[in-house]
Image: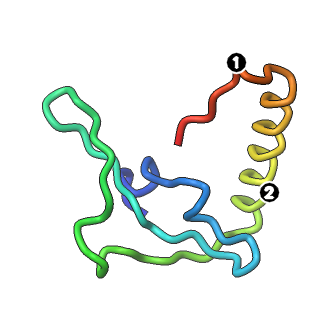
């Protein structure tokens, strides 16, 4: 995956059941401003297999998010 694709990953890009990650968004720096955008076109959308290591890392991250949300309640915000 390209760096801009990895930075653009969101939870809706991960399909744990199918075991895949799909590139739907990218992040690029344009004159000191970071812009988040959809891929340029549908052919840029690519799907990759979700490896065991990455799957476990993402599941652990989800558990951390749930725990932080529980601990900090309304003060916790998850940026998409």
Q: Residues within 10 Å of mark 2 (few under 14, many from 20)?
A: few
Residue 18 lies left or right of residue 8; in this view the side is right
Q: Quadrant of residue 77?
A: top right
The residue where tag 1 is placed is: 75
Q: CA distance from mark 1 to mark 2?
A: 27 Å
Which residue is at 76% across, 37% downward? 65
Q: Which is more foreground, mark 1 or mark 2?
A: 1
Which residue is at 80% across, 37% downward? 64
Which residue is at 74% across, 60% downward? 53
Residue 34 lies left or right of residue 20; in this view the side is left
The answer to whether residue 62 is above or below residue 16 is above
Residue 68 lies left or right of residue 15; in this view the side is right
Residue 68 lies left or right of residue 77; in this view the side is right
Q: Residue extending furthest left?
A: 31
Tag 1's secondary structure?
A: helix
Question: Which of marks 2 and 1 precedes in the sequence?
Answer: 2
The residue where tag 2 is placed is: 56
Q: Residues within 10 Å of mark 1 (few under 14, many from 20)?
A: few
The answer to whether residue 35 is above or below residue 26 is above
Q: Residue extending furthest front?
A: 74
Q: Quadrant of residue 66?
A: top right
The image position of residue 80, as x and y in percent, is 52, 43
């Amino acid at each position: 995956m390209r760096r801009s694709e990895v930075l653009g990953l969101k939870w809706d890009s991960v399909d744990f059941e199918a075991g895949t990650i799909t590139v739907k968004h990218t992040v690029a720096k344009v004159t000191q401003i970071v812009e988040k955008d959809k891929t340029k076109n549908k052919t840029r959308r690519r799907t990759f297999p979700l490896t065991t290591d990455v799957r476990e890392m993402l599941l652990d991250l989800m558990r951390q998010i749930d725990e932080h949300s529980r601990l900090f309640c309304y003060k916790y915000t998850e940026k998409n």
